Amino acid sequence: MLISKYINRIERLDQMIRLKATGSADDLAEKLGITSRMIHYYLDYMKDIGAPIRFCHTNRCYYYEYPVSFSFGFDKSKL
């Protein structure tokens, strides 16, 4: 799989987590068209690189414990 596909999925997960629109891992997997096992893989990876992801059992959604930002790419403004 191309790395761009992984990055795109992480960006989509980040956006859904920010919106608190994930639902459970199974719901999220269905929304993204991948398995729930892959959802856990992505969430674990995001946590490994510093994402403070938690799951709210009351609202049944993933959320960030505190505000963070995720970006991947090159920033031309640093030139």
Image (cartoon, grey):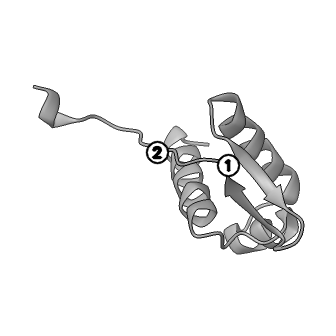
Quadrant containing the C terminus is top left
Q: Residue furthest left?
A: 79
Q: CA distance from mark 1 to mark 2?
A: 12 Å
Q: Quadrant of residue 32?
A: bottom right
Q: Which circle, 1 or 2, is nearer the viewer? A: 1
Residue at the disc numbered 2:
69
Q: Element type at marker 2?
A: loop
Residue, x 87% and y 68% (percent of image)? 26
The quarter of the image holding the N terminus is top right
Q: Characterize the local packing of mark 2: few (<14), some (14-19) or many (20 or more) Cα atoms within 10 angstroms.
A: few
Query: Where residue 34 sits in the image (x, y, percent)?
Result: 76, 62
Query: Does dot 1 land on a helix, a strand or a loop?
Result: loop
Residue name at image x 86 percent, y 58 percent? 36
Number of numbered discs present?
Answer: 2
Residue 17 vertical placement versus 70 (above, below) = below
Q: Amino acid at mark 1?
A: Glu
x and y, in percent, of residue 18 in the image: 57, 62
- Report which residue position mark 1 lands on: 65
Q: Quadrant of residue 21?
A: bottom right
Assess disc 1: are there few (<14), some (14-19) or many (≥20) residues with their C-alpha within 10 Å of its C-alpha. Answer: few
In this picture, residue 15 sits left or right of residue 29: left
Please identify the residue farthest to the top as the structure is shown.
79
Query: Mark 2 belongs to which amino acid?
Result: Ser
- The residue closer to the viewer here, 40 or 20, is 20
